[in-house]
Image: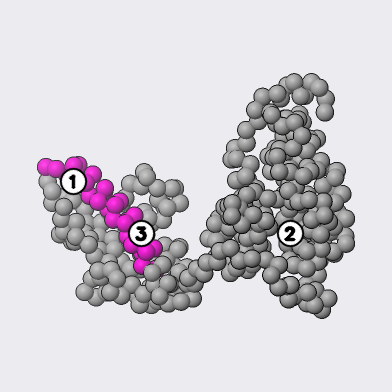
């Protein structure tokens, strides 16, 4: 690298968001785009990525693999010994043969810009590839196992040094074919190759009990939003009409300073039907059902009524949620 560039960027380079978060977000964006049912993180470290992905509704199975069971140290491809690296494509692309493979690894071309980096970025790294080396390996692997591959990365270089490339380089492999009889022969893994360290089975919304809990929680959250804005509005109107309390309006138009613009607009539009009668406030179930997340969870208005029955206080005709605002 040109000496002048080294001197110019001798300071500490910081990424916002941090580089590891950018890597995780890159994978999460791919998951949300392609909606896979199964995702495996090879070199899962402390399982941070898996925790992020568990909230993606499309995923049914999440698996994490790491060489260190006790500490779960950070391991990506550059931590592999040469003998292990030679077996890596055969295991991942040939044996596992997933639809999409995402590999991220440090770009050694970027290292001169990082303060304190002499040889490798981590003492456990066995090697670090530059852009040409990584792309050469990826293209050869893709051709051998019938994948296409595209290159990108996270961590942009300083202006004027675009040739250095991303701080972390990424290759996205996409399988060109569906499972064949050849890959089906490798379906049964060898015994005792992997050891189960931890397993968790999360509840499914296909189970009526868990669905009810989710719906009730979301309904209560929605009610709290409307309730708070109703009370704020009533307090404001009370101050304005302090000389004549009879002028207080029965419907409310909430001032949504604390919420996002989209939510503010939605609450204002849908909550106009809510009203106060004496010390009792009414929020129609139809209003609650119109909120996107409640709607998605329930599917039908009848399902909403069934799931919240006995869980929240309803009006005598069952058409609205009621609560006391006396204090």
Foreground mark, 3 or 2? 2
Query: Would you say residue 44 is visible in this rendering?
Result: no
Foreground mark, 1 or 3? 3
> Looking at the figure, which quarter contains the N terminus?
top right
- Structural distance between the alpha carbons of marks 2 and 1: 61 Å
Q: Check disc 3 and report the residue beneath it.
A: 221
Q: Check disc 2 and report the residue beneath it.
A: 101
Residue drawn at (88%, 62%), measured in percent from left and top?
144
Mark 2 secondary-structure assignment: strand
Binning the other alpha carbons within 10 Å of mark 3 as few (below 14), some (14 to 19) or many (20 upward) gives: few
Residue drawn at (42%, 53%), measured in percent from left and top?
263
Q: Check disc 1 and report the residue beneath it.
A: 238
- Is residue 251 shown left or right of residue 176? left
Looking at the image, do the residues carrying marks 1 and 3 touch, with CB atoms under 8 Å apart? no
- Does the stretch in magenta take in 165? no
User: Along the polypeptide, which appears first: circle 2 or circle 1?
Assistant: 2
User: Along the polypeptide, which appears first: circle 3 or circle 2?
Assistant: 2
Q: Position of residue 145 (x, y in %)?
A: 84, 64
Q: Position of residue 41 (x, y in %)?
A: 65, 58
Residue drawn at (16%, 58%), measured in percent from left and top?
279
Quadrant in the picture for residue 211: bottom left
């Amino acid at each position: 690298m040109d000496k002048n560039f080294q001197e110019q960027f001798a300071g500490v380079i910081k990424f916002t968001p941090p580089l590891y978060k950018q890597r995780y977000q890159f994978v999460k964006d791919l998951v949300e785009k392609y909606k896979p049912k199964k995702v495996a993180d090879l070199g899962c470290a402390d399982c941070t990525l898996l925790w992020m992905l568990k909230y993606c509704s499309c995923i049914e199975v999440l698996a994490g693999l790491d060489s260190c069971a006790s500490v779960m140290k950070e391991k990506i491809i550059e931590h592999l010994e040469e003998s292990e690296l030679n077996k890596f494509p055969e295991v991942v692309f040939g044996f596992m043969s997933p639809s999409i493979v995402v590999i991220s690894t440090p770009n050694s071309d970027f290292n001169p810009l990082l303060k304190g980096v002499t040889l490798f970025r981590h003492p456990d790294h066995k090697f670090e590839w530059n852009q040409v080396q990584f792309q050469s390996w990826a293209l050869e692997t893709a051709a051998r196992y019938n994948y296409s591959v595209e290159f990108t990365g996270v961590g942009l270089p300083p202006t004027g040094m675009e040739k250095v490339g991303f701080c972390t380089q990424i290759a996205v492999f996409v399988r060109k074919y569906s499972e064949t009889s050849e890959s089906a022969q490798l379906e049964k893994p060898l015994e005792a190759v992997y050891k189960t360290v931890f397993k968790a089975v999360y509840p499914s919304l296909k189970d009526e009990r868990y669905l009810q809990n989710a719906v009730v929680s979301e309904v209560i959250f929605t009610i709290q939003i409307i309730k708070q804005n109703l009370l704020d509005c009533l307090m404001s109107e009370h101050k304005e009409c302090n000389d004549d309390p009879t002028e207080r309006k029965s419907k409310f138009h909430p001032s949504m300073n604390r919420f996002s613009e989209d939510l503010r607009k939605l609450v204002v539009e849908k909550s106009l039907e809510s009203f106060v009668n004496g010390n009792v406030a009414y929020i129609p179930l139809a209003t609650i059902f119109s909120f996107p997340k409640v709607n998605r969870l329930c599917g039908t208005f009848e399902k909403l009524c069934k799931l919240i029955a006995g869980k929240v206080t309803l009006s005598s005709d069952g058409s609205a949620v009621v609560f006391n605002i006396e204090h």
